[in-house]
Image (spheres, rainbow, N blue to C red):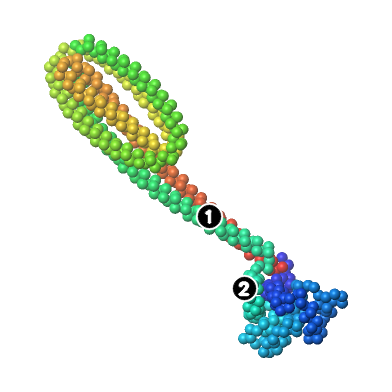
Amino acid sequence: MATSTYASTPETTNSNRASRILLGPCTDQLRDILRHRVPPANFHHVLTRNRSNLPRLTQPQRDLILPRSGRYSGDYSDMDISLLYLLLRNICNISAHTNGWGNAPDVSDSSLSASIDRIREARNGVVHSSSTSVTQTEFNALLHEIKISVIAMDAHLGNSNKYEKEVDFLLTETMDPEQDVFIQQLKKQVEEEKITKEIVTKLDKQVHEDISTINEGVERLDTRVETLERGGERLDRGMERLGTRVGTLERGKERLDRGVEKLGTRVETLERGKERLDRGVEKLDRGVERLDRGVEKLDRGVEKLDRGVEKLDRGVERLDREVERLDREVERLDRGVESLDREVERLDRGIESLDRGVERLDTRVETLERGEESLVRGVERLERGVDKLDTRVGTLERGEERLDRGVERLDTRVGTLERGGERLDRGVEKLDRGMERLERGVDKLDTRVDTLIRGEERLDRGVERLDRGVERLDRGVERLDRGVERLDRGVQKNKRDIEDIRREVIEKQSVQGKK
């Protein structure tokens, strides 16, 4: 860009600012002093009485205050400093300062005439200067002379430092209104940046609190998983012991030749059991549909997270108690199996006549196996329904609610085990009554074994779901971290935008300075 010797500089700005102060508030202050001394309504009479005291006036001054026709009827707002000085000096009866009117007053002189002379000299120094520049040192000295005069005249007028405030305003008021707009925009950007920082700080604090809460929940879930794993191990040991007892019973079945006629009733029972299994599969299908509908309700359950956590704690405590109760039931089963062993030893002597029922028993076992396969297919359908539910669960809160339902189902299974233990006890007692009761007791024992197996499978699936819930929790924490990173990038972008605006303002000032 081309430069000019007349471009604005701090020195030219000082000169312009001094001119505005002298021609603005200082001139208005001299007008107020004249009004205070000579009200405009009395001006003509005072002027006529003191006309001989006036020096030679310029033609414009004479035309203004001594018109050829009529008289002056203004309010002094059309008088400049030169005319105001002449009138204040010659018609207002203001005492001259120690050095006399028209001379530079002493620095310590604060009289009204000294203040008026200082304003006149300052005005003449600026207006009649051969240069358009005023150095900062010269400006500070000039401003000092002006301010002590303005303060003294404000005290004379008793106007609560009116014109001193106006001078202070002009000292800080911008000389470029367009630049002032940019400065205001910059201040607004700074305020917005402060607000943004406060929001980011609050978000960061909230994120850290959420992460702490999530970590605590993960630790509690880990503890519950360990408890479930220990319960699974105890169930495994119980299954091994039950497997040993079942093996003993199976060896006894080889000698049940003569139980064919009575086993026919078992076939009917097994067939009815198969029908019940089929109905159970249908119920499982309906349960899957209910699970799908439950997924829709899960979306509305976010607000229940806090209560869900408390329920989880209580559920885990209840699970611990149920596991302990399950241990006691396993011990009871062990004692019952021991009783069965003793009864088998007693029955070994009485079941030699049952050898002919092996083939028919094998046929019934095959029927039972087919029923078991149907049950497995139903369980697989249930697992697919659970997988479908898992794919729709996106947050830890909904996973915890699923865990609550799992705990409730586990409670149901434990109740089933308890009822099974009671039925097993009754079966042991019935063994004392004969061969027919032994067959029903074996049938009940098979049912209890199936229940235990299903309970173990469901427990395994519950642990797997817990693992998936922990993985989803980890992904949620990662998403929170990415959100914090995005917030940080947004703050950095705001800082860069503010820096760009600052550079634009500086460039604008530089361009205007060169102009």
Q: Position of residue 437 (x, y in %)?
A: 19, 17
Q: Position of residue 88 (x, y in %)?
A: 73, 81
Q: Quadrant of the N terminus?
A: bottom right
Please name the residue shown 50% across and 56% down the image.
198
Q: Position of residue 26 (x, y in %)?
A: 69, 76
In the rendered view, would you say 205 is above or below 444?
A: below
Helix, strand or loop at mark 2: loop
Q: Which mark is residue 196?
A: 1
Give the residue type at disc 2: Ser
Please name the residue shown 38% across and 41% down the image.
307
Left-right relation of 146 to 253: right
Quadrant housing residue 11:
bottom right
Q: Position of residue 18 (x, y in %)?
A: 69, 75
Q: Which residue is mark 2?
A: 160
Q: Observer-nearest residue: 166 or 43?
A: 43
Helix, strand or loop at mark 1: helix
Badge 1: how crowded within 10 Å, few (<14), some, or many (20+)?
some
Please name the residue shown 43% across and 37% down the image.
301
Left-right relation of 39 to 364: right
Camera sees residue 424: yes
Quadrant housing residue 137:
bottom right
Give the residue type at disc 1: Thr
Q: Earlier in the sequence, mark 2 or mark 1?
A: 2
Please name the residue shown 70% across and 75% down the image.
32
Left-right relation of 68 to 127: right
Camera sees residue 256: no
Quadrant housing residue 453:
top left
